Amino acid sequence: MKSAVLTIIILFTSFLIGMSQEKNATRVIAHRGAWKNTGAPENSIAALQHAINLNCYGSEFDVHLSADSVPFVLHDHSIQGIHIEKTNATDLKKIKLANGESLPTLEEYLLAGKGQNKTRLILEVKSSSISKERSLTLTKKCVELVTQTGVTAITDYIAFDFDVCLQVKKLNPKAHVQYLSGDKNPEDLSAAGLDGFDYHFSVLNRNQNWLAEAHKLKLSTNAWTVNDEENMRWLMDQKIDMITTNEPEKLLKLVK
Ligand code: MG
């Protein structure tokens, strides 16, 4: 009887330790999906699906606005010599990625990520190369499409433009928004009502107290784009919440 009770206590304690480790483990975000080791093009729906199959916490992707105000998923401002912001959706839809996929609209991308809840959709609202007004129009379209496609509960936002971050919070106060540019300290972000930062790891190297300060302020912390084991370990040692990487497979092994 005694040994049965002891076994139960040991099992329960191990369960609690396991839970706390799970809670504290750094979460893995695949930067532009899982493309590097899978051969899928960056920001393709295939790269998103690979990130989901890997059980990543999140899969990041970038969004631009077509000339006729349709959001498309792509990192650069142009593809195959075609400038997204200066081209209409009908023509953009004809573009093929290297794996044969059509250049995805944001709507198609969000629908591809729907129906699962293990991998969050990390939506980066890109800054317009034309005007601030277009950046804000894109922001509004993104929040609308996330709502319309029914993926609000699994979508988070990131942006380099501080006004875009504020606009997302204004449109959906419950949205989780991290700022990317690295020029604001945790206190400023907290005062502005944002949820956290996603800064280049060199910014966190220069400002060694920011991770601890952010934790105190209950801000979420994330770093991009961390591909080498040394920096991954350095950030994990400081209890960063998330790491965005082109090497999700490598980081997944480290956080285990
Ligand atoms: Mg991005």
Image (cartoon, grey):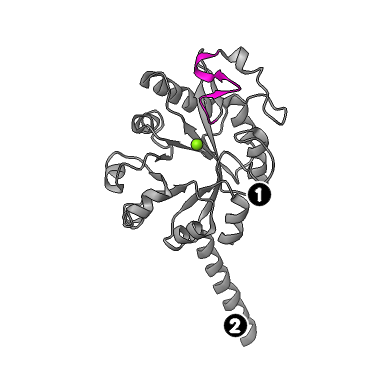
- From which residue to which does the magenta span run? 75-87
For ligand 1, tell me if the residue under mark 2 lies within 8 Å: no
Return the x and y of residue 125 as percentages of the image width and height: 46, 30
In depth, the one of 213 and 171 nearer the eye is 213
What residue is rendered at 50% in x and 14% in y? 86
Is residue 205 toward the left or the right of residue 231 in the image? left
Q: Secondary structure at mark 1?
A: loop
Q: Quadrant of residue 90?
A: top right
Residue 105 in magenta stretch: no
Sequence order check: which comes first, mark 2 or mark 1?
2
In depth, the one of 55 and 171 nearer the eye is 55
Return the x and y of residue 79 as percentages of the image width and height: 58, 24
Badge 1 density bin: few <14, some 14–19, many ≥20, Cα 10 Å: some
Is residue 17 toward the left or the right of residue 46 in the image? left
Q: Quadrant of the C terminus?
A: bottom right
Gap between marks 2 and 1 measured at Cα: 37 Å
What residue is rendered at 52% in x and 64% in y? 21
- Amino acid at the residue labelled 1: Leu
Residue 83 in magenta stretch: yes
- The answer to whether 218 is drawn above or below residue 97 in the figure is below
Residue 6's disc number: 2
- Amino acid at the residue labelled 2: Leu
Return the x and y of residue 219 as percentages of the image width and height: 37, 49
Residue 54's disc number: 1
Badge 2 density bin: few <14, some 14–19, many ≥20, Cα 10 Å: few
- The answer to whether 78 is drawn above or below residue 62 in the figure is above
